[in-house]
Amino acid sequence: MLWSRREARKMVVAAAGPDRRAAPRLDKVFRVYLEGETGCGLGIARNISEGGMFVETRSPQPIGSQVRITFPSENGDMIAVAEVRYVCHLLGRGTSARGPLTMRGMGMRFLYFELDEAVPSLLQ
């Protein structure tokens, strides 16, 4: 049996069920630095919440690994340690001058944040 795109989209949405996200998302895009078991790199953070975020990167770390994430700032860097929960490699339909459009990245769950002694505490 063949379905139209509209019917197929309705079935995918119905199968996905309700949104399981417990916290609201901040849909802001910003640069982060990553350090993991397979090396260091640069990433673009997206869709951040208090529990985690998605990071676009050329070389995602393995699922289950811990990654140290540095959020650069003029007021001092913020550092988080997160666990990689999923990895995705998406290939888009369009093409650019450099080839097909692709997106690689990883969904991450925050484990804890490190204190930077160089940054004065806001609580003092």
Image (tube, helix red, strand yellow):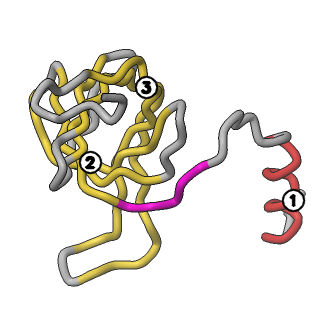
Foreground mark, 3 or 1, reads 3
Residue drawn 34% across and 69% down? 101
111 or 92: nearer the viewer: 111
Report which residue position mark 3 lands on.
Answer: 110
At label 3, the amino acid type is Phe
In the rendered image, the quadrant that contains the C terminus is: top left
Q: Secondary structure at mark 2?
A: loop
Residue drawn 89% across and 57% down? 1
Q: Quadrant of residue 114?
A: top left
Outermost residue toward the front? 124
Q: What is the C-alpha distance between the residues marked 2 and 3?
A: 17 Å
Q: Secondary structure at mark 3?
A: strand
Picture layout, residue 99 above or below residue 56:
below
Q: Is residue 2 left or right of residue 30?
A: right
Foreground mark, 2 or 3, reads 3
16 or 19: nearer the viewer: 19
Report which residue position mark 1 lands on.
Answer: 10
At label 2, the amino acid type is Thr
Q: What is the C-alpha distance between the residues marked 3 and 1?
A: 32 Å
Residue drawn 39% across and 21% down? 83
Residue drawn 36% across and 24% down? 82
Number of marks in the rendered image: 3
Q: Secondary structure at mark 1?
A: helix
Q: Is residue 86 left or right of residue 14?
A: left
The boundaries of the magenta stretch are 25-29
Report which residue position mark 2 lands on.
Answer: 57
